């Protein structure tokens, strides 16, 4: 055991950074009204109900105001009182199930510590997947994962009681299983588990789950034949039927939103908006990165390397595992597309970047591969750029622990270096004066992608036989 720990010691850095960021962030209030706010109390109350009563009905917890420990203001109404008097939170139940014991034993702090531990596991798995599956040097993988989880938004959601980090972990498990050199039975089981788990964390993760399922189907067809495709499809079909049956029985609809107070008049599917403008939402393709307040770049400028990394994967001028590009980019594209066209808004009562957290570890792997293989000269500048994001987290923690800001409503008061300096140069999509800066940043991003193609086109194609060899595998161990 001690020798195993020594061999895996390089994974401790990202895990400890994620854990520290999460635990320290618990001391920062979510809003002026409470240490946990918005959707967090719903998850915590459901977890408490599962622990004490063994059911999802939180009517007794609401009546007893069990939320007063962590939310001192009046709790916003999210549930509709059902015919039998019960109230079931309009949120999928897997996260409360995971947190039932921690919340039952340690209260809201126990729940947030459990979230931090999940973030630590996700950070370690990110580093391991980058190194073991995509050939990133261990040192680069370890430091890169630490920088990612030491920066917003991953550092913030390391303690926020939302399904974002567990969903990111499940997605990463699926990718790590699928990109294995030989697709054995255990890898198929892990991939299927990830696909099944994601919708129970949130229906918004269905597109990512579908992308993982499609990739699994392609790989099984290539390597094992139709028998295994049909077997995996049967498992997923049964899981899907069970998912819908449980939702109809418990929530009375196809999604959990059927019991939500907000959707009684407009219907559960209005969670994506009433008459959504999908063309207008296309602005988010760029805005998710560079929005002045809710984009990724103002808090962690290292995410500017995501598009060059994606382009490099598509150009593929460096070693990759078999089907590595498909396995990494399919769920990443599905998650980004969901945040672009399906999400009701990119601006809400949450910390910026929430909608893409589920696939950010995949984006981080792409960036780490970029600076390790096709463009290694970028490694140190990229690390310096990403280090600015860690300064953002440190500044936010200092301000938050002093009571100068909260995670949800006034993060725009942050004095984080990147945010403070970049804010005037970034488009504010919540205003009417974003078009010029949007065009400028679209041009900058496209120019970066074109420059990546130009640089890589001058490089010889390098292959690594051990990674590139397509090995047939019958799946059974």
Image (cartoon, rainbow, N blue to C red):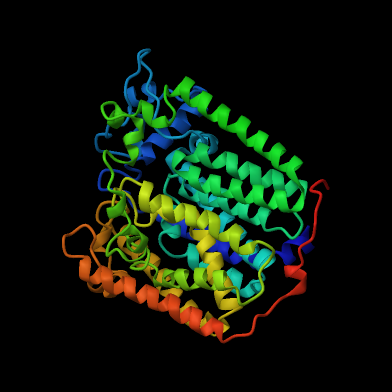
Q: Residue furthest left?
A: 432
Between 247 and 471, the one nearer to me in the picture: 471
- Quick one: quadrant of the N terminus? bottom right
Q: How many numbered circles are shown? A: 0
Q: Position of residue 416 (x, y in %)?
A: 32, 69
Between 191 and 13, the one nearer to me in the picture: 191
* In the image: residue 225, left or right of residue 398: right
Q: Residue furthest front?
A: 226
Q: Is residue 426 above or below residue 25?
A: below
Q: Is residue 223 visible?
A: yes
Q: Residue at x 65, y 67 (%)?
A: 134
Q: Position of residue 9 (x, y in %)?
A: 68, 66
Between 376 and 214, the one nearer to me in the picture: 214
Q: Residue at x 37, y 37 (%)?
A: 41
Q: Position of residue 232 (x, y in %)?
A: 68, 39
Place residue 37 in its image quadrant. top left
Between 314 and 395, the one nearer to me in the picture: 314
Q: Residue furthest right?
A: 477
Q: Is residue 143 visible?
A: no
Q: Position of residue 90 (x, y in %)?
A: 39, 31
Q: Is residue 386 above or below residue 344?
A: below
């Amino acid at each position: 055991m001690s020798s195993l720990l020594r061999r895996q010691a390089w994974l401790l850095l990202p895990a400890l950074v994620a854990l520290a960021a999460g635990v320290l962030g618990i001391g920062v209030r979510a809003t002026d009204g409470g240490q946990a706010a918005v959707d967090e109390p719903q998850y915590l109350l459901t977890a408490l109900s599962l622990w004490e009563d063994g059911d999802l009905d939180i009517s007794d917890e609401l009546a007893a105001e069990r939320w007063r420990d962590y939310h001192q203001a009046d709790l916003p109404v999210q549930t509709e009182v059902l015919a039998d008097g019960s109230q079931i939170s309009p949120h999928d139940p897997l996260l409360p199930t995971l947190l039932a014991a921690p919340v039952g034993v340690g209260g809201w702090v126990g729940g947030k510590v459990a979230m931090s531990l999940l973030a630590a596991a996700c950070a370690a798995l990110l580093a391991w997947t980058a190194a073991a599956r995509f050939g990133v040097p261990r040192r680069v993988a370890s430091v890169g994962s630490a920088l990612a989880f030491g920066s917003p938004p991953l550092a913030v959601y390391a303690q926020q009681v939302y399904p974002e980090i567990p969903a990111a972990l499940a997605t990463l498990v699926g990718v790590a299983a699928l990109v294995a050199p030989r697709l054995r039975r255990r890898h198929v089981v892990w991939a299927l588990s990830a696909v099944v788990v994601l919708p129970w964390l949130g229906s918004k993760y269905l597109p990512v789950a579908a992308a993982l399922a499609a990739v699994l189907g392609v790989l099984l067809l290539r390597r094992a034949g139709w028998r295994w495709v049909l077997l995996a499809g049967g498992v997923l079909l049964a899981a899907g039927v069970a998912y819908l049956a449980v939702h109809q029985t418990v929530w009375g609809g196809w999604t959990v939103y059927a019991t939500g107070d907000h959707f009684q008049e407009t219907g559960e599917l209005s969670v994506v908006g009433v008459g959504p403008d999908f063309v207008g939402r296309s602005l988010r393709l760029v805005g998710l990165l560079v929005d002045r307040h809710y984009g990724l770049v103002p808090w962690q400028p290292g995410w500017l390397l995501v598009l060059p990394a994606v382009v490099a994967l598509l150009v593929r001028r460096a070693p990759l595992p078999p089907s590595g590009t498909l396995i990494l980019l399919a769920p990443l594209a599905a998650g980004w597309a969901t945040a672009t066209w399906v999400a009701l808004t990119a601006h809400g009562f949450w910390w910026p970047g929430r909608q893409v957290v589920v696939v950010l570890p995949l984006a981080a792997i792409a960036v780490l591969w970029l600076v390790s293989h096709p463009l290694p000269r970028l490694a140190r500048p990229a690390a310096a750029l990403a280090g600015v994001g860690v300064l953002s987290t440190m500044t936010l923690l200092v301000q938050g622990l002093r009571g100068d800001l909260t995670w949800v409503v006034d993060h725009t008061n942050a004095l984080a270096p990147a945010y403070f300096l970049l804010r005037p140069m970034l488009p504010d999509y919540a205003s009417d004066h974003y078009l010029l800066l949007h065009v400028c940043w679209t041009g900058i991003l496209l120019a970066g992608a074109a420059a990546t193609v130009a640089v890589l086109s001058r490089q010889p194609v390098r292959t690594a036989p051990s990674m590139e060899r397509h090995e047939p595998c019958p799946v059974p161990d």
